[in-house]
Image (cartoon, grey):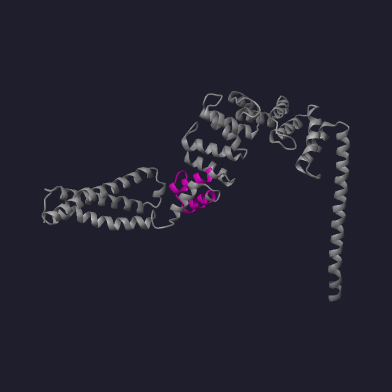
């Protein structure tokens, strides 16, 4: 039995290897025959065969990648009016693949393809007019070609048309129309469009403001790697906009954006994770624990000792006490609110704190210390 198993295992391996080798050889022969047949058709002037052969050379599939050969066969098919070949040839001139970059030549072939209602060519032509590549920049003309391609369901063109309507370039600004085209492209999985649609929902532009819907579309774009969507989704989870406040989710999305180099996400991540003492909840609590008793003592000192606010120095000390108490209040609020870094009025909070700190320094330097120095000289 052991001898049988010892012989059987190598035999099975040999048989499997022979079967695999035979299959690979058969496949290679079939591909070779197909390639020969395709080339024969192409050489006889079959436009579809010429286009297919050109695309194989361009992509490097089943033949070695060879852009000059791709140009040759695309040109042959394009000259017969084959729309897809005209567009691909135009793109190669536009990108400078296999030929010197030539906007005029690119425009010629893409225009011919677009004239045959090729949605990809119409979208490319719209982009060329929008960017001013090979033509004078013309937003109205860009909108016209984007519209043609968008109506055929081209997601890139729908996104481009939405952007044009949103910014009012070449067409009257129309947020509702922008949102409509963003929606069409977003539903086809176009990440930029999903992000654009989310933005319209977030700000209520062309659609009712809806943070939950904004979060839904931001998530779709973020899952495709859109860094702005990732950073915004982190913010929404940090502040509870359209989603529950979830610190772990906020950190996760901020980290994804930060890993792509987004500076806003990096700063937010540092703040949210509490790296370092300054700016953390512990620092806010420590500030409150120090500022509150000091402020209370300074403010009540004249009362506890039966003093009156007859001197400017004593009044300044009482005001300084109030400043310390106010600062302690701000620190306690920041400590209580774990998401203070993402509060809508964070800038106002920071300004208030800086003003209080400036007032405290001003009072100490200009009144308290000066008055104390004067008293020392008088003695």
Left or right: 58, with 226 as reference point: right
Question: Splitting the image into 4 quarters, where does residue 143 fall?
Answer: top right
Left or right: 89, with 353 as reference point: right
Left or right: 245, with 148 as reference point: left
x and y, in percent, of residue 254 in the image: 50, 50
User: What quarter of the picture does the C terminus occupy?
Assistant: bottom left
User: What quarter of the picture does the N terminus occupy?
Assistant: bottom right
How many numbered discs, if any? 0
Range covered by the magenta-colored residues: 228-257
Q: Is residue 90 magenta?
A: no
Q: Residue furthest bottom?
A: 2
Residue located 29% across and 50% down the image: 327
Q: Nearer the viewer, residue 153 or 263?
A: 263
x and y, in percent, of residue 266 in the image: 49, 50
Residue located 43% across and 47% down the image: 239
- Predominant SS along the magenta part: helix
Q: Is residue 233 magenta?
A: yes
- In the image, residue 12 sits, relative to residue 330, either above or below, namely below
Left or right: 146, with 273 as reference point: right
Q: Is residue 209 visible?
A: no
């Amino acid at each position: 039995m052991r001898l049988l198993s010892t012989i059987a295992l190598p035999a099975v391996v040999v048989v499997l290897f022979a079967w695999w080798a035979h299959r690979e050889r058969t496949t290679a022969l079939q591909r070779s025959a197909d390639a020969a047949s395709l080339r024969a058709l192409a050489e006889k002037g079959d436009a579809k065969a010429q286009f297919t052969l050109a695309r194989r050379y361009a992509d490097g599939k089943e033949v070695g990648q060879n852009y000059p050969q791709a140009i040759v066969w695309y040109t042959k098919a394009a000259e017969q009016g084959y729309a897809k070949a005209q567009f691909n040839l135009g793109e190669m001139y536009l990108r400078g693949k296999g030929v010197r970059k030539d906007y005029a030549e690119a425009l010629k072939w893409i225009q011919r393809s677009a004239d045959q209602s090729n949605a990809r060519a119409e979208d490319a032509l719209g982009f060329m007019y929008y960017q001013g590549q090979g033509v004078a920049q013309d937003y109205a003309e860009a909108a016209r070609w984007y519209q043609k391609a968008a109506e055929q369901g081209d997601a890139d063109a729908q996104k481009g048309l939405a952007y044009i309507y949103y910014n009012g370039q070449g067409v009257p600004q129309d947020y509702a129309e922008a949102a409509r085209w963003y929606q069409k492209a977003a539903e086809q999985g176009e990440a930029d469009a999903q992000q654009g649609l989310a933005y319209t929902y977030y700000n209520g532009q062309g659609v009712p403001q809806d943070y939950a819907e904004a979060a839904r579309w931001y998530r779709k774009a973020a899952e495709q790697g859109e860094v702005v969507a990732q950073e915004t989704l982190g913010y929404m989870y940090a502040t509870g906009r359209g989603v529950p406040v979830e610190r772990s989710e906020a950190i996760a999305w901020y980290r994804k954006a930060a890993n792509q180099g987004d500076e806003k996400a990096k700063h937010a991540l540092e703040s949210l994770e509490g790296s370092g003492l300054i700016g953390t909840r512990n620092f806010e609590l420590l500030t409150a624990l120090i500022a509150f008793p000091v402020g209370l003592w300074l403010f009540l000192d004249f009362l506890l000792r039966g003093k009156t606010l007859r001197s400017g120095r004593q009044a300044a000390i009482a005001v300084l006490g109030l400043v310390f108490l106010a600062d302690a209040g701000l620190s306690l609020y920041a400590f209580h609110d774990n998401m203070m870094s993402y509060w809508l009025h964070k800038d106002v909070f920071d300004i208030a704190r800086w003003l209080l700190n400036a007032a405290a320094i001003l009072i100490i330097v200009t009144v308290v210390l000066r008055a104390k120095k004067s008293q020392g000289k008088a003695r």
